[in-house]
Image: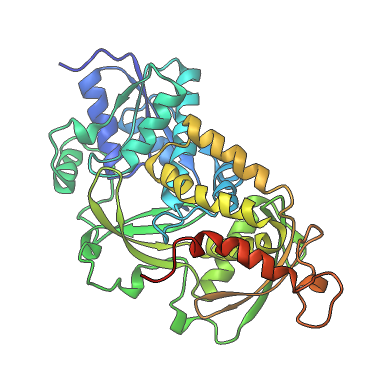
Amino acid sequence: MAEKINKIVLAYSGGLDTSVMLRWLKEQYACEVICYCADVGQGDELSGLEEKALRTGGSKLYVEDLREEFVREYVWTAVKANAVYEGVYLLGTSLARPVIAKRQIEIARREGADAVAHGATGKGNDQVRFELTYYALQPDIKVIAPWREWEFKGRSDLIAYSQEHNIPVTATQEKPYSTDRNLMHVSYEGGILEDPWAEPPEDIFQLTRSPENAKAEAEYLEVSFEHGEPVAINGEILGPVPLLESLNKLGGEHGIGRVDLVENRFVGMKSRGVYETPGVTILQVAHRALESITLDREVMHLRDSLSVKFAESVYYGFWFAPEFELMRRMVDETQRNVTGDVRLKLYRGNAIVVGRRSPHSLYDEKVATFEADTVYNQRDAEGFIKLNALRLRLRGGPA
């Protein structure tokens, strides 16, 4: 018998899975179910969603526009940290989950709900990301994950159930792959992509042209940063959402930001994922270029040593963990002087840095020059080298 629940807030998209979940939750728990849809830039058509939710059994629907918060607080934070999981993945899906789950908990508190539910499966990372956020923000919340509980084995079972109960869904057969889209990226996995030897078909991509079909002419672009956060393109000040949208469009036209990898999921298995992240790919390149002239060497190296742990924590779902909060503060401290402009050339899949400048630049041409100078005595290098060689010489040389 199902645990006694009084009110549930369901993360609801109106698709097959969550539509069936809405009806299933009503049957299993015999309580009020409130639907919640987060807009993080996925581009889904929201018109008619409320009618569908109410018709399927929901008491009301919240549609929350989280795009600004998602980019400003989550995407920009990852850019400042140069966060890349396993050297390749820019964390587009991972970064969206905590902002979605956070608002779900806020709605649950507002509505006096004692439970939340999500549509993530029992094999993936998203179940962990959602639930770690739930518990961090509301320790006593009850979590319902239908895919770990119900009798359905796959999509065909859900379609049969929806037909039997007259649930309005448009799905008729399994797609050849699954997608997840937000303002930062589009991800593709499963189905025809499960063979890691098979090349992704060109027609799956939504944001980018292939490099061979990209614009034939190179395009120059200038990105401006303040304290590590992008604020302008070609001198035009833009808010977080329009700025990222503009870079996605520019990057996509030049075939920038495609990634194909086999990643290690937190639950233990390996999974093949294909991603498009044009705008943030450009920002990562530009941000590192600006840091190269504004960050002290040891500060940069220390921050880089944190970047792997930072990315791993985001991927695993520990956004609201104490160690992550500490890393965020440390990253923010490193970004105080990361202000300036970076000029790039976009061409056939590449974002190439061609210039960087900052009022806080630590680069001094007078010191770095190969011409005559009066600020650096080259003889000083001899003592420096000998002191660093001392422990090597004390080893006794070759055997």
Q: Residue at x 33, y 59 (%)?
A: 188
Pick out the residue farthest to the right.
374
Pick out the residue farthest to the bottom.
216
Residue 188 seen by the camera: yes
In the figure, 71 relative to 285: above or below? Answer: above
Q: Residue at x 33, y 36 (%)?
A: 128
Q: Is residue 357 left or right of residue 211?
A: right
In the figure, 216 relative to 112: above or below? Answer: below
In the picture, residue 376 is in which quadrant? bottom right
Residue 168 placed where, x, y %? 28, 42
In the figure, 303 relative to 8: above or below? Answer: below
In the picture, residue 235 is in which quadrant? bottom right
Q: If the image is split into quadrants, where does the N terminus sit? A: top left
Residue 80 placed where, x, y %? 60, 51
Q: Is residue 169 left or right of residue 63?
A: left
Residue placed most toward the observer, 191 or 78: 78
Residue placed most toward the observer, 75 or 201: 75
Residue 123 placed where, x, y %? 23, 43
Residue 46 seen by the camera: no
